[in-house]
Amino acid sequence: MSKLNPPVHQGDHFEGAANAALTLVEYGDYQCPHCGAAFPIVKQIVTHWGDKLKFVFRNFPLSNAHPMAFPAAVAAEAAARQNKYWEMHDAIFEHQKTLSPELLFLLAKNVGLDLEQFRNDIQDQDLEDMVNEDFESGIRSGVNGTPSFFINGDKYNGSYDYDSLQAALHAKVQHTHTH
Amino acid sequence: MLEKGQQAPAFDLFATPDQRLKLKDLQGKRVILAFYPADFSPVCGDQMSLYNEMLKYFRKYNAELVGISVDSKWCHMAYAQERTLHFPLLADFQPKGAIAQAYGVYNEQEGQCERALFVIDEQGTIQWSYLSPTAVNPGADGILDALESLSDNKQKTTAHV
């Protein structure tokens, strides 16, 4: 079974509780239609578990297939510098079908970013490096398509519908309790 | 299926409608040979599209990726254009599946290659091989691990000299 490599670390963006016993990691591409379809499902799951779950998103942009995936990932990282990562992440997925460089600026404005700083940050090589590091960690973890999920570090190979993901999360909780 | 330590069988196959590629042409580089069943499998989980995104990570380890299936050179051309693939696809077309057979990864019943990976070192020796269930995209963690251990070994040998 493929293992998340490296495990969740300080550089990761997360929703939910930092020290939750249950961790769900998604490798995703902002322009991948399957990730777009998974987005509201993941939101529902995050809401359901509340502080019992830590949800982490790592970038896995397939740039040849999806030319806006990488710029969108950089834009989300730039928003993180203004403490608006998840606002930007959500806004990008909500507008996935119409992504363009202009739209990223519009979304940045809508979530309340300082546009001057945003404009500088998206040109910062460090942010590109962060996205590439996510991608490389995905290869090492056995990501074979997007979205790919890991539950407490183990690759989840089921489908990404709500019931299947929830069943896998519940099974992991049971497993943790019996050991 | 051939395994670690065996010599990689030579090949000389069409990579484009008018160019052939030999294993010998790649001497001095590591080669990732990826046998796959057919062009034009569904997009999002497509193994070749995925590897297309990973070429720069493979090149960090001096490794070139080569895809191979029994599809014809014209089919490969259309597939590579549609998916904007930036690595060669070899046509194991005539005689059909001969190279796949030499590597022990031809599925006689289906008339196509198995989904199988080989990492070949600079001297043409197989250093890692992996057979995946046909329906499962194996990702690239195994490839990267194999390339990394090759680089580690090389460093060790150089250090002894």
Image: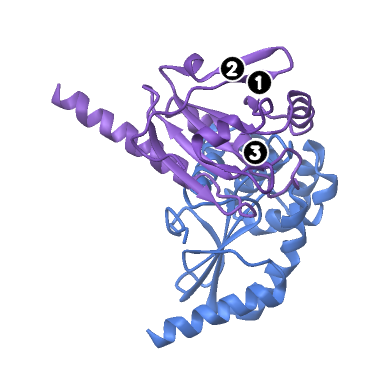
Chain colours: A blue, B purple
Of circles 3 and 2, the one toward us is 2
Asked if the residue at tag 2 contacts the one at tag 1, i.e. Cβ–Cβ closer than 8 Å, the answer is yes
Give A151 or B77, whichever is nearer the viewer.
Answer: B77
The quadrant the C terminus of chain A occupies is bottom left
Residue at left 55%, top 39%? A127
Q: Which amino acid lies under the numbered mark 1 shown in the image of this protein? A: Ala
Chain under callout 1:
B
Asked if the residue at tag 3 contacts the one at tag 1, i.e. Cβ–Cβ closer than 8 Å, the answer is no
Q: Which residue is outermost to the bottom? A: A178
Q: Which amino acid lies under the numbered mark 2 shown in the image of this protein? A: Leu
Above or below, comparing residue A104 to residue A19 in the picture = above
Q: Residue B21 has which mark?
A: 2
Residue at left 43%, top 28%? B8
**Are the residues flagged by discs 1 and 2 from a single subunit?**
yes
Q: Which amino acid lies under the numbered mark 3 shown in the image of this protein? A: Met
Asked if the residue at tag 2 contacts the one at tag 3, i.e. Cβ–Cβ closer than 8 Å, the answer is no
Instruction: Identify the secondary structure beneath mark 3.
Output: helix
Task: Name which quarter of the figure residue A123 lies in.
Answer: top right
Q: Residue B48 has which mark?
A: 3
Q: Residues within 10 Å of mark 1 (few under 14, many from 20)?
A: many
Instruction: Say whether residue A130 is visible.
Output: no
Q: CA distance from mark 3 to mark 2?
A: 18 Å
Q: Looking at the image, how many numbered discs can be counted on the residues?
A: 3
Give the mark, 1 or 2, whose residue is nearer the N terminus. Answer: 1
The image shows residue A74 at horizontal and vertical percentages of: 63, 41
Residue at left 68%, top 66%? A159
Tell me the residue that label 1 is attached to. Answer: B15
Give the mark, 3 or 2, whose residue is nearer the N terminus. Answer: 2
Residue at left 74%, top 45%? B41
**Are the residues flagged by discs 1 and 3 from a single subunit?**
yes
Instruction: Identify the secondary structure beneath mark 1.
Output: strand
The image shows residue B139 at horizontal and vertical percentages of: 55, 47
